[in-house]
Image: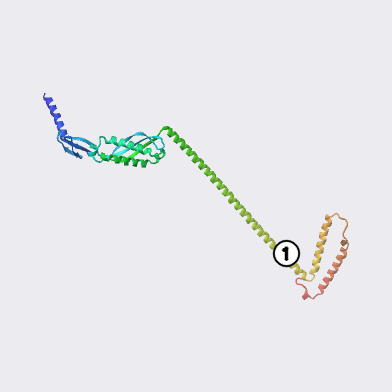
Amino acid sequence: MIWTILLIFILVAYVIFTRLFIIVEMREEVIQERLGKFKKTLKPGFHFMIPFVDRAAYRQEMREQVIDVPSQTCITKDNIEVAVDGLVYLKVMDSYKASYGISDYISAAVNLAQTTMRSEVGKLTLDDTFSEREQMNENIVREIDKAADPWGIKVMRYEIRNISPSKEIVDTMEKQMEAEREKRAEITTSEGQRQARINESQGEQRSQVLVSEAQRQRRINEARGRAQEIQLVAEASAKGVQRVAEAISKPGGDLAVKTKLVEQYIDEFGKIIKKSNVSVLPTETANLKTFFEGVGTISQHTNEGSSRMPKQHQPKGE
C-alpha cells in the first residue's frame, strides 16, 4: 500500500514538474497556448508554465531544411514524357504562421514544388529542359515563395536533381546524337578534303608561276646573252674590218688582199673539184698560170718599188 502511494506521488510530481517548466533548444521555437489560446512564442531557453493551464502546442524547426521532392512524370512542350525530381530548401521565418497558417507546411511545399515543376517543364522542349535548368529553378523558387508567404516559410532555393526521359526517348536521342556525330565527322572530313584540294591547287598555281617566272628569266638571260654575243661579234667584226681597212690603206695592202682572195678562191675551187665528178674544167682554169704569172710580176714590181722608197716613208715595223 505504501509503495503504491509512493508510486502515485512520484508520477504526479513528474507530471507537475514536466508541466511546470520547459526547455527550448537553440534550433527551435515553441508556441505556448493558455487554455487553448495562443499565449506567446517561446524562444530558446528555460521557461515556466502553469500546469494544466499552459501547454507547448507546437515546436518549429528554425534551421534551414532540405526536403526531397519525389520523382514525377511531366510532359514537355514537344509532348515527351520525362521523370523529374528535385530538392527544395526552405526555412521557417515565422513560427506563429507556420503553426496556425497551415497544418503541414512541408507537405504543402512539396506538393506546390511538384505542381510548379510540371508547369515549368510543360513550357519547354526536351532539349531546353537540359539547358534551362537554372532558369527553371529560379521560376520554381519564385512561385513557391509567393504562395508560401502566408505560411511563414521562406523558400531559399530549388534544385532539379534528375531529368530522366523514357527508355524509348533515350534510345532515340542516342541515335540522334550518333547521327549528329557522324554528320559532323563527314563535314569535318569534307572540309579537310576541300582545304587539301585548295592547298594543292594553290601550290600548283604557285609552282606554275615560279616555273613561268624562271622560264621568263631564262629567256631574258638568253636574250641578253645573245645580245651581248651579237654586240661582241659586231664589235669584233668592226674592229677586224677597221684593221683590214687600215692594212689595205698601207702600201702593198691592196695586193695582199687580192692575193688572199686568190688563195681562198683556189681553196674553194679545189674543194668543189674533190666533191664533183665533172671532168670538164672551166676555161678560166687554163688561164690560171697566166694569172699567177701576172700576179707574180706585179708582186715583183711592188717589192722593187718599196725597196726604192726612202726609209722615212717606209711603214713602221718593216
Residue 172 appears in view: yes
> What type is the residue that disc 1 sits on?
Ser
User: What percent of the width, then of the height, locates residue 49?
Assistant: 15, 36
Give me the residue at 55% from left, 47% from top: 198
User: Which quadrant does the C terminus fall into?
Assistant: bottom right
Q: Secondary structure at mark 1?
A: helix
Counting from the top left corner in percent of width and height, residue 123 is at 38, 39
Give 226 or 166, whichever is nearer the viewer.
166
Instruction: Report whether 49 appears left or right of 180.
Output: left
Q: Is residue 27 visible?
A: no
Depicted 9 relative to depicted 264: above or below: above
User: In which image quadrant can residue 50 be found?
Assistant: top left
Left or right of residue 148: residue 135: right
Q: Which quadrant of the view contains residue 68?
A: top left
Which quadrant of the figure has residue 95?
Answer: top left
Please give left or right for residue 211 compared with residue 105 in the image: right
Query: Can you identify the residue that label 1 sits on?
Result: 237
Question: What residue lies at 32% left-to-right and 40% top-to-bottom?
Answer: 143
Q: Give residue 194's position: percent from left, percent from top.
A: 54, 45
Location of residue 253 with respect to 182 vertically, above or below: below
Which residue is at the far top? Answer: 1
Q: Is residue 7 above or below residue 133?
A: above
Q: Tag 1: Cα neighbours inside 10 Å, few (<14), some, or many (≥20)?
A: few
Residue 1 locus on image (x, y percent)? 11, 23
